[in-house]
Amino acid sequence: MPVPPSADQVKDSLKRLRRGHGLARPTTLLTTIDESVQAYLARGYEFEPRSAGHVECLTRVLRRTIEQLSDSERVYVEVDFNLRPEHRFSTLTDRQESLAQQLKCAVKTVRRRSDHALETLTYLLLTGSSALTDLPQRPAPAVRAASEPNAEESMDRFWGLNRGGGVDIVCSEIPPDERPEYASPHDRNYLRYAKFADLDTLIFVRTRLAQLAPDVVVRDFAPSEYFGTHADVLVVIGGPPWNAKYREFLPQLPFHFDSRPLGEDDPLIVPDLDNLTLAPRWTPGGELIEDLAVLTRITVQGTTVFLLGGCLTLGVLGAARCLLDAGRGSTNAGYITERAGDDDFVVVTETRRVGGLTDVADLAVVEPLLLMARPYGDHWKVVVDNTERFTRQRKHSPRPTS
């Protein structure tokens, strides 16, 4: 039998689960519940790891344990985990506010009672019996072994990488009058990649996708070459000034870049935050201190689209490394999944370069400047807002001019 997890482990997992859509989206159980807690809750039952049966088993354990709560506590847990249709909202805050209005009490009262009910649920999960007699059983050690997905598998799910599937990359391109002569197909020393603007990021993304999913077909295009081919995943590299494909998605996004003349920064504008403006930071001597990495995921007609942007090329590379770095990519993906689930999201964070090395954000240690999310086709909402951190440091320090 698996070693029982600590009460704090169970409670922390439950707290993560009740964020976002909760049990209204059962697949989030596989990413929000600690592996050791999953193994303990599903002890003794037969299922394929990461399968629908795995999700069903965990869901039934939780639902049947919730049914054991007293009426006075069960209502708070059911609202927290999005099990009450009359309080069906995509965020925990909205659900608790809805219950507070119904009970005609303060929201802080609902939160306090919810926390108490969560304590009781934690105790029942650790001490009770799930009694799922309608699920096939097997020895507990096999269940424990099956509940150990690795970081690569988590990244595959986050990116939507399926065996035999396809990923199209559309990388920004240098304007024709700025390209070297050998970027032309008519030049005797023609180099196709000479017209790509964010070449460092393109090479990094292609390399990491090949490592994560060697069975996935990855193709790259310049915006002028690309005409939608219904790939499983579309990765757009580089912001709208030099990437026409990125510009196509701007009407759906809660931000835009203020396009400036060549040689000037293109600051990020967030209209819903009083037209908040975020731009790169420079030293008085004209050295770049930090850029903004802008990471976006949206779903369009079944295609998962990732937009990797920044005010400068540094921000674009920082966005790619934040989500694909071998050391921190899976942790950052987990941070986003805990707060946005499978919803569309926008993440804005700082990225820095020291010499030739690009810093990789660790969102679990330093939260992003901004995280916005929306259910498919819904309105964007702010989930995390730390933009004061950036604006306070900046104190209006525009890029030096020569």
Image (spheres, grey):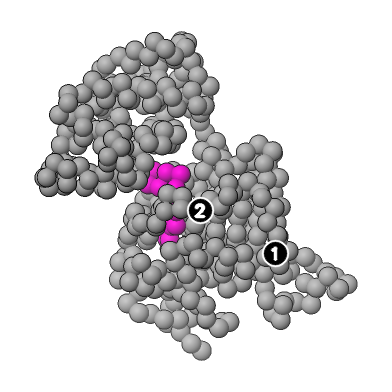
Give coordinates of residue 222: x percent, y percent: 70, 64
Q: How many residues crowd mark 2 within 10 Å: few (<14), some (14–19), many (20+)?
A: many
Q: Which numbered tag is attached to residue 222?
A: 1
Q: Nearer the viewer, residue 56 or 280?
A: 56
**Residue at coordinates 70% horizontally, 61% vertically from top-left?**
226
**Residue to which mark 2 is pinned:** 297
Asked which quadrant contains residue 24, the reply is top left
Q: Residue 298, how many percent across, how many down?
A: 51, 53
Q: Residue at x 47, y 62 (%)?
A: 253
Residue pushed farthest bottom? 402
Residue occupying the far right of the picture: 188
Q: Residue 135 versus residue 399: which sits nearer the camera? A: 135
Drawn side of residue 17 relative to residue 159, left or right: left
Q: Secondary structure at mark 1?
A: loop
Magenta-tinted stretch = 335-350
Look at label 2 and name its amino acid: Arg
Note whether residue 389 is visible: yes
> Is 344 included in the stretch rendered in magenta?
yes
